[in-house]
Image (cartoon, rainbow, N blue to C red):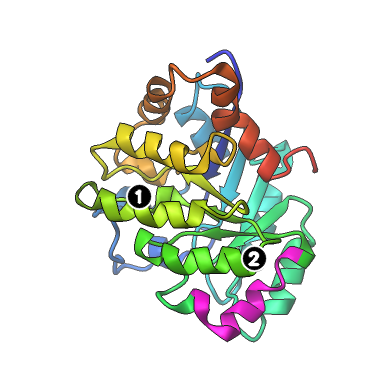
Amino acid sequence: MDFPIADAHLHVWDPQSNYYPWLCDPEPIPFRYGDYGSLKKPYLVADYRADSAGWGVERGVYVEAEWDPRDPLGEMNFIAEVRKGGFPTVAIAQAWLHREDCAAVLEAQARHPFVRGIRHKPKPGMMDDGKWREGYRRLAPLGLHFELQAPWRQLEEAARLAGDFPDTTILLNHTGLPADDELSGWAQAMAALAAHPNAAVKISGLGNVQRKREVVLKTIELFGAQRAMFASNFPVDGLRSTFAEIFSAFDAITGAFPQSERHALFHDNAARIYRMEQR
């Protein structure tokens, strides 16, 4: 490609030195890609660089990897060491918005100059809960946005949240987790969230989707080329495809788009929304 890439969603980890329950505990968790045993090993920046070689990835967004929930601050201290070479460019931290320590955790995470938001995977109904919303209300004043990973059936809640807190950006992870046999309902739910200008979406996590072209084009249609961005979700999506296969598909699907829109989807939107110029 003749322009740089900003990968909007990636992970690095070291389960040999740090505790991630899903990577370290012997009993696996239910996982949408099935057996994930091959992920239970260190995956560091050098490994990501090897996987993404040849694709001109200049910037990247580290997203919390379900680090030990008893120690939500430890993960960003680990990332501060990892990114001494400048990559990943920015990070999304862990926080539990309904916990009593929410205020202190958010303030501590925000003190890292590279942290841009937090991710919490809410259970159904949680985004309407008053206690959870008390924590959510603290994000915007700290300069943080919300990374939402939830199945598309929860996007009605997310749309209410976006409407009630218009000053807080919601970044939807993994395209709302669509399924081939449910795309009509998925599209309606995505449209409800996309109607709010403070919502954006990362097109990623499509390892179980056969109708990728339809999903990608519909997502861009709903959110527009200025509120969507491409991401690898590596190494997790490496269980289904190589990095080159994922980005080759994005490239082919958008091949007829104006060059300005391709720049936006592959780089500029992530750089802008994640404020990558601020270090």
Front in this rendered view, residue 84 or 190: 190
**How many discs mark residues in the rendered view?**
2
Residue in view at x 50 percent, y 65 percent: 158
* Secondary structure that dominates the magenta span: helix
Residue 38 x/y as whole percent: 32, 48
Q: Is residue 276 visible?
A: yes
Residue 59 x/y as whole percent: 64, 34
Within 10 angstroms of label 2, few (less than 14), some, or many (20 or more) residues?
A: some
Residue in view at x 42 percent, y 53 percent: 190
Front in this rendered view, residue 134 or 81: 134
Farthest-out residue, left: 181
Amino acid type of the residue tagged 1 in the rendering:
Ala
Q: Which residue is mark 1?
A: 187
Q: Which residue is mark 2?
A: 74
Write the start and end of the magenta stretch as one range.
Answer: 127-140
Residue in view at x 48 percent, y 52 percent: 173
